[in-house]
Amino acid sequence: MKYDYIIAGSGCAGLSLLYSLLQSPSLQSKSILVIDQAPKNNNDRTWCFWEKTPGLFESIVHAKWNTLEFLATDLKKELNLGSYTYKMILGLDFYNFVLDYAQQFENVTFLQETVTGIDAEDAAAIVRTSENSHTGTYVFNSTQVFNPKITEQNSLLQHFKGWVIQSEKPVFNPKVGRLMDFSVSQKQGATFMYVLPTSTTEALVEYTLFSPRVLAQATYVSALKKYIKEDLNIDNYTIKHEEFGVIPMSLAKFEKTSKPHVVNLGTAGGFTKASSGYTFQFIQKNVAEIVGHLEAGKHPNLTTSFKDKVYQWYDRTLLDVLLTKKLTGKEVFTRIFQKIPAKKILAFLGNESSFAEDISIMNSLPLKPFLGSGIKQL
Ligand SMILES: Cc1cc2nc3c(=O)[nH]c(=O)nc-3n(C[C@H](O)[C@H](O)[C@H](O)COP(=O)(O)OP(=O)(O)OC[C@H]3O[C@@H](n4cnc5c(N)ncnc54)[C@H](O)[C@@H]3O)c2cc1C
């Protein structure tokens, strides 16, 4: 059988695409095969992102904030997000939401297989798995089969361990999320704590680093324990859930298209912002573009605008500054958050800023280290 669409990899990007296709009156009856090596029944990650209006997944937003704060040594700044809202979605809520919705469509088939390669052939693409091969007019891939090599020279890793803790006493303000607290030790690289309270007694507390290598698990655990006790002043708490993640922040090229009739999605398609690791909102924007192309009867390939290239250059420049250690992450983020209103920073990090806003952010940073890296990354 030849499918209209094969979705290889059903994580955030694959299932976002599936949901959008099934929402589209002209595409919802296409034959769709979804392949993943995992059953997607674990709460393996928490996604946070910001947007100005309710999004496609508004009904499963777990918590949201209109105020965040940024901390560094001797600095505590409350960030007013303007028209942006910072939102949190739990991985398992997202998987269940899309998979339940897809149940009503007989034209959608799910297979649990491991993809080993994808080839193009005339007007189709063939997904090879450890068990079979499957043909589709278009393949949307978010597995790692085409990923470039991540090395210490071309990438930093954003690695983190997060605990959802429940405190005995009410200690949190659920209206204010702590986006970054850089007051912690910077010995291991750019290091910050991320604290997102969802009630007065519950919060996600995450120890996050940008560095070349992951650490021993015991190091994350002791940093979390120390921060909860000494900075959050919590003595009695239980750990309700934990997550661990590694996101590549890379200068290596993740291709949007590797072969004809194959579109790469999500991290595999370069949707992860190289300078921050945020991916969720870029997945949603890119999926909307793909679906728009298909509805118009066009090839689903993603376009790259001039402004997209400019953002890629900003990201690469910042990453180069961090990789070559011209400035520390703490210095860069502290300068930006000290001088620039949060709504402008979020617009910039979400690839939605004007050139005037870009210039104001550049002016908040020292020219010399960025000039060298900027020229190198042009
Ligand atoms: C713990 C964690 C927390 C994160 N938090 C945020 C956040 O707050 N905000 C944000 O914007 N981004 C966040 N990210 C980054 C990014 O949004 C996620 O990694 C996101 O899941 C990327 O979506 P994806 O579809 O590209 O990859 P995934 O969601 O990882 O999906 C890829 C899918 O492909 C499958 N797969 C892989 N290889 C094969 C194969 N060979 N054969 C078959 N199936 C295969 C996997 O099982 C998986 O289901 C986080 C990442 C992690 C790991």
Image (tube, helix red, strand yellow):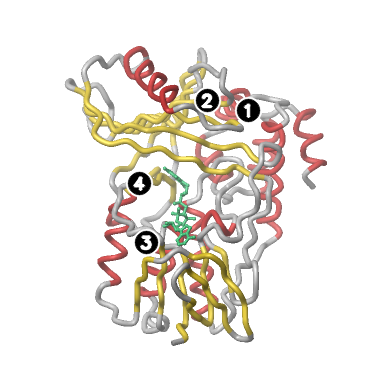
Q: Amino acid at mark 4?
A: Asp
Judged from this view, the residue extending furthest toward the left is: 168
Q: Secondary structure at mark 1?
A: helix
Q: Report which residue position mark 1 lands on.
A: 332
Q: Is residue 111 left or right of residue 76?
A: left
Q: Amino acid at mark 1?
A: Val
| Label located before the other in sequence (1 or 3) | 3
Mark 3, residues whose alpha carbon is within 10 Å: few (<14), some, or many (≥20)?
few
Residue 236, relative to residue 309: is it above or below?
A: above
- Asked if labels 2 and 3 touch by Cβ distance under 8 angstroms, the answer is no
Q: At x 35% / y 12%, what residue is drawn?
A: 230
* Location of residue 314 in the rendering, given as x and y in whole percent from the top left corner: 69, 44
Q: Report which residue position mark 2 lands on.
A: 191
Q: Is mark 2 within 8 Å of ligand 1?
A: no
Q: Report which residue position mark 3 lands on.
A: 56
Q: CA distance from mark 4 to mark 1?
A: 30 Å
Mark number displayed over residue 44: 4
